[in-house]
Image (cartoon, helix red, strand yellow):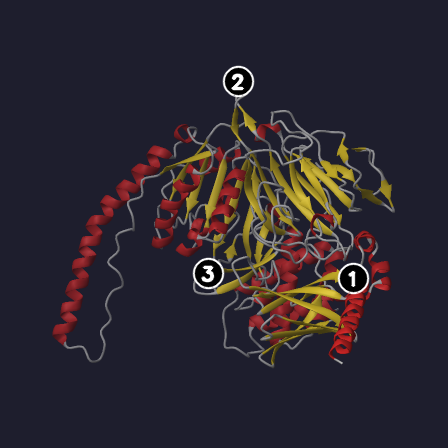
Amino acid sequence: MKQTHWLLGLSLCSTLCLVAEAQQPSAEKKKQLAALTWTDPVKAAAEDADFLIQGEYGFAKNNSDWGLQVVALGEGKFDAYLLEGGLPGLGWTKQKPRMRLTGALANERVEFAPSDASTKIVVSNRKAVIARDGKMITELPKLERSSPTLGAKPPAEAIVLFDGSSADAWENGKIENGLLANNDIATKQSFTDYTLHLEFRTPYKPHARGQSRGNSGVYHQGRYETQVLDSFGLEGEMNETGGIYSIAAPKLNMCLPPLTWQTYDVDFVSAKFDSKGERKSPAKITVRLNGVLVHSDQELPQTTASARITKITAEPGPIFIQHHNNPVFYRNIWIVPKKEVLVNAKTKKLLVVTTTEGFRHGPAIAAAQRILPELAANSNGEFAFDFLPDPGPRPNPGQAPKRTPEMTDAQWAEKQSAFESRAAKAKSELETWQSKVKDAFQQKFTVAELENYDGVVFSNTTGELPLPDGAAFVNWISKGKAFVGMHAATDTLKGMPPYYEMINGSFAGHPWGAGGTYNFVNHDPTHPVVSMFPPEFQWRDEIYQYNNFNPASVHVLISLDMAKSKPQFPYHVPVSWVRNVGAGRLFYTSLGHNPETWENVTYQQHIVAGLRWALKISDGPATPNPFVSAEQSLKSIVVSASTTLGKDAKILTEKALSKAKANPEWATKMGSDADSYRKLPNEPDGNTESKKSKLLKQLVDEIEK
C-alpha cells in the first residue's frame, strides 16, 4: 500500500512537473515573443489589450499626491511604479519615494500589490484606484501627456534636416510612411555648436527587455550619444532615454510610453582647443527631454562608448542616428548652428552694481555679492565680475514716532528726543554716503571707463542712481554691450526715460508678495535663458507688475500664470524677458527678491544662462513676441470674468483665443485696454459700478460680441 501511494505521488509529481514545463515557453518561443513589435499605435490598441492599460495615471498639474506609471511586460503581465508627489516633471523627483508593484490582467482589470500587501492598486476603465490598508486613498485618471515642444517650428535661421518631404540631408536616409527610419544614418553636413530639435517614437515591444526594447540613439558630432530607448517607468540610467550613454544619467526619467511621439531639444557646445591644438575645455550639452531639463551644461570629457568618431578634435561632426535593430522613427528635425563669433570669446568682464537709493533688498544683495563671484569662478573663464563699491543702506532715521493715548508726556518726550538724535546722525552720515555713491559712479560710469567692460549688471538696485549721463550709458550698451537686471533693476531710475525704455518697464507694485508661492508659464522652454525651467512651474518669490512695459519691444520668456495664482487680475504680468538694444543685448528677470531664490541652483542656472546670452556666448531668439502678452492678457481677463462675473471660463477662453488668432491687432488692443485696469483706483469688493468692474465687463463684452 505504501509503495502504491509512493508511485502515485511520483506519477502525480511527474505529471505536474511536465505540465509546468510545458507552460514555460521554450527558448525559441521566448525569442519569438521578444521580437513581437508594433510601430503603429492604432494596430497595437486593436491587437494587444495590454497596450490600452500601459501608460500614465495621474493629474496634469504640479505636486499632486500621487502618480502611477504602468509598464506592459507581455501576456497580461505588468509592472507599476507608484510615485509620491505626482508624475515625473509634475512633482516627482529621484529624491522622492517610488514603489514597484507587479500585476496581471484578469477580467479586464489589473490588480497590483507589493509583497507586504499594504498598498493595493486596481487599474480598469482608464483609471487607477489606490488603496492602503483596505482604504481607498485616491483615484487617478489615465493621462496621455505630450511634449510642449512637439511640432516646434524651425526658426528662420534653422537648417531643416527632415520635414517628411525628403531624406536628402542624410547619408543612407530612408523615408517610411512619411517618417525618417533609423537606418544608421548621418547628416551629410557637419556641425560645431548648435541647437537641435528632433522628435522620435519608440516601438511597442512588451516582451522585450532592457536594451532590446526600442533601442536607438542620437550622436552629436558622431561622438556623444543621447540615448533613445523605451525606458518608460524605469530608473533613469545613463543607458536609458535622457541619458548620455556611458557618461551621465538624466536628472529625471522623462521618457513617455512607447508609440508616443517624444522630443529632444539639445544645446550643444563642442570642445575648445588652443592654437597648439591642446584641448582647453570639454564639450558641453544641455538636454531637454519632452520639455523637461535633464542635463544642464553637462561636461562631456570623453566620447560615448561605441561612438562613430572616437577622437575628440576641433573638427565638426555629423548628427548620427543609430539603428540598433529596432524600428525607431524620427520626424521634425532641425538644427540652428551657432555663429563662430559666439564661440571663441575671451573672458568677458562685467561691472556689477548693488547700490540702492531707495528700498534695500539687504539679504538678497548679500546673497548676490557672495554667489555671483562663485558663478564666475565656475564659468571656465567665460565671464568675470568687478563690483562697484557699495556703501550699504542709505542712512535713514526710520519712521517718526507716533504718540499713543496711553503714552505719558515724559515717554513721548523721550521718543521724540531719540528720533531727533537718529535723524541728526542720519543727516550727517547721508552727506558722506552720497559722496561715496556719486564718486563711485563718476569713476566707473564714464563712457571711457565703461569701455573696460563687456556689460553691466544691476542686481536689486533701486532709486535714482547718480549716472553721469543716462543716455550715454544706454547708447554704450547699444554698441554691442550686455545689460543684465535682477528683480529691483526695474525699480531703478524710474525718472530716466532712456533707462526704463531700455529695460522696458518700471516697478508699479507687487500684489504677489515675497511670502507666496505662485505659478508661472515658460513660453520658450528651448531658449537657453529659461531652458532650466519646465513649461509650467511654481516659485516662491516677490513678483512685480510694471508701468512702461511695451510688449512689442521684448521677447517674453516667463509670465505669471494668473489662472493658478492669487490674487488674480485681468492683465498680463511678464516675469522675464530678453531683447536686443541696438547691437547690444538685455536680459531681465523679476525673480530674485528672496535670498532663498539666490541659493537655488535652478535660479543660478537662469542667471548664468542670461549672462551668457547677453554676452553673446550663447544664442537664442530675441524677436519681440507681443502675441504672448496679448494671449496672456486675454486669459487673465477670462480668469477675472469667471470669478467675478460668473462666466464660463472654457467657453470664454475659446472665443477669446479664436478672435485673437483671426485678428492679432484686436488682441493687442485688448491687452493694452486690460493693462489700464491696473491704473484705476481700488474700490470696495462687489461694487459693480466701480471703474474696474465696468472696464472688466466692457472687456468681456468685447470678447463675446
Tell me the distance, in whole angstroms, between the alpha carbons under discs 2 and 3.
Answer: 55 Å
Q: Earlier in the sequence, mark 3 or mark 1?
A: 1
Q: SS of the residue at dot 3?
A: loop
Tell me the distance, in whole angstroms, between the alpha carbons under discs 1 and 2.
Answer: 64 Å
Are dots 3 and 1 in contact, CB under 8 Å? no
Within 10 Å of disc 1 (Cα), the crowding (few <14, some 14-19, many 20+) is few
Residue at the disc numbered 3: 509
Residue 20 visible, this angle = yes
Residue 492 location in percent, x, y? 42, 49
Q: Is residue 5 left or right of residue 250?
A: right
Q: Nearer the viewer, mark 2 or mark 3?
A: 2
Q: Residue furthest left?
A: 410
Residue 634 location in percent, x, y? 65, 62
Mark number, residue 276:
2
Residue at the disc numbered 1: 24
Q: SS of the residue at dot 1?
A: loop
Q: Earlier in the sequence, mark 1 or mark 2?
A: 1
User: Which image quarter is the N terminus in?
Assistant: bottom right
